[in-house]
Structures are given as C-alpha cells and as structure tokens.
Amino acid sequence: MRIFKILIILSTVSVFLVGCSNSDSKIAENPTKIEGKKTTENTKKILSYAEYQKLFEALKSNLKISNFELKNGTFTGDLTIVDKDLTYNKRQYLTLNGELDNGVPKTTQELLIFENKNQSTQISIRIAFTQNYIGEDIIDWSMLSGLSNINEKLSEMSEIVTFSYKNIIFIIHQISESKKDIEITKEVIRNIQKITK
C-alpha cells in the first residue's frame, strides 16, 4: 500500500512538471492604441478662461445653501505663488500662463466661503481652471469617519468632495465644530450642478 501511494505521488508530480516545462506557450501581446481624435473632441467641450470667470461670477451671485451665507472669497485679484517643482516645473504662479502677469493676474483658482448663521459650520468651495477636459463626475469623496486608529470625533467634523465639470475642478470642504452634515455637502454639489448646466 505504501509503494502504491508513493507511485501515485510521483506520477502526479511528473505530470505537473511536464505541464510546467512546456516552453512552446506564447504570451499574446495586445498593444494599447491612443487615439488623438478623442482629445480633439474633448477640447471642444472645455470652458475658455473667460467662461470660467463667468461661471465663478454666476456661482458668487447665484449659489445658495440653506441656512448659509456667503462670507468671503477671492473677490479681487488673487495670486498664489508656489515652488515650481510642485507643479512638475510648469509654473511658479497659479495663473493661466504660470507667470506674473502685468495688471490683474489671470488666476486659475477661485474660492467662496459660506458659513451658517451661528458660524459653527463652514463650507469652502475651491474652483480651479485647467486646460484639459476631465469630464463630469465626482473624483473623490473623502470621509474619514469610521476608520480605526484615528481620532473619530475629529474625523466627523470635516469632509472633502472633489468633482469635475468639463475642465473645471470643484473642491468642497465642509468643516464643523460638532459634526459634519453630509446632506449639506450634497445640497452644495446639486446647486453647483444646476448652475453649470
């Protein structure tokens, strides 16, 4: 009986070895093809810088959030200076051409800050202009509550949502003294979407 078991094990191992040593197998190569046509179609969908500025003005004038008031934002020329290496060496200023323009800079980011009546919750809305079509979708919804090994109380006070509209990026940040309200964030997104349509 013992010899029979050894023979079965040896024959099984030899079958596997023969199967694994077959060098005739080939890996099928399927190169990815990048189509330039889609890029051309997508550039027709992006907002111009002037349209981006009009969108910001429309948001500043028309965006309403229940029980919140627009308190502050970038209502005059705003200029952000960054270390050039942080932009993959493309620009030192967050402006349209990456340079310090004469006169009013053509900034590629704007900000609106809303607060509720008792100033216990703040919604900041960052609007950023890019020259590339991104699409219309939520990119990220960062909710930290429910994660282990972190300060749960602190994580319940804030959330960040990033979404895109054509070539514009919106970053919604809600921070509260007590607990964030996801319904407020949803309302902000829906109201922005109504203005962009």
Image (tube, helix red, strand yellow):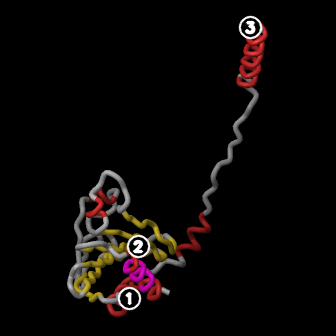
Residue that carries the numbered disc 1 in the rendered image: 54
- Residue 48, position as x, y percentages in the image: 43, 81
- Camera-nearest residue between 108 and 113: 113
Q: Which residues are magenta?
A: 184-191
Identify the residue shown where x is 42% and y is 75%: 168
Cα separation, mark 2 vs mark 1, equals: 15 Å
Residue found farthest to the front: 1
Residue that carries the numbered disc 2 in the rendered image: 169
Q: Judge from the rendering whether residue 34 lies leftward or rightward of residue 67; answer left or right.
A: right
Residue 108 visible, this orientation: no
The answer to which of marks 2 and 3 sits earlier in the sequence is 3
- Disc 2 is placed on an element classified as strand
- Camera-nearest residue between 161 and 51: 161
Identify the residue shown where x is 38% and y is 64%: 142
Identify the residue shown where x is 63% and y is 52%: 32
Task: Identify the disc placed on residue 2.
Answer: 3
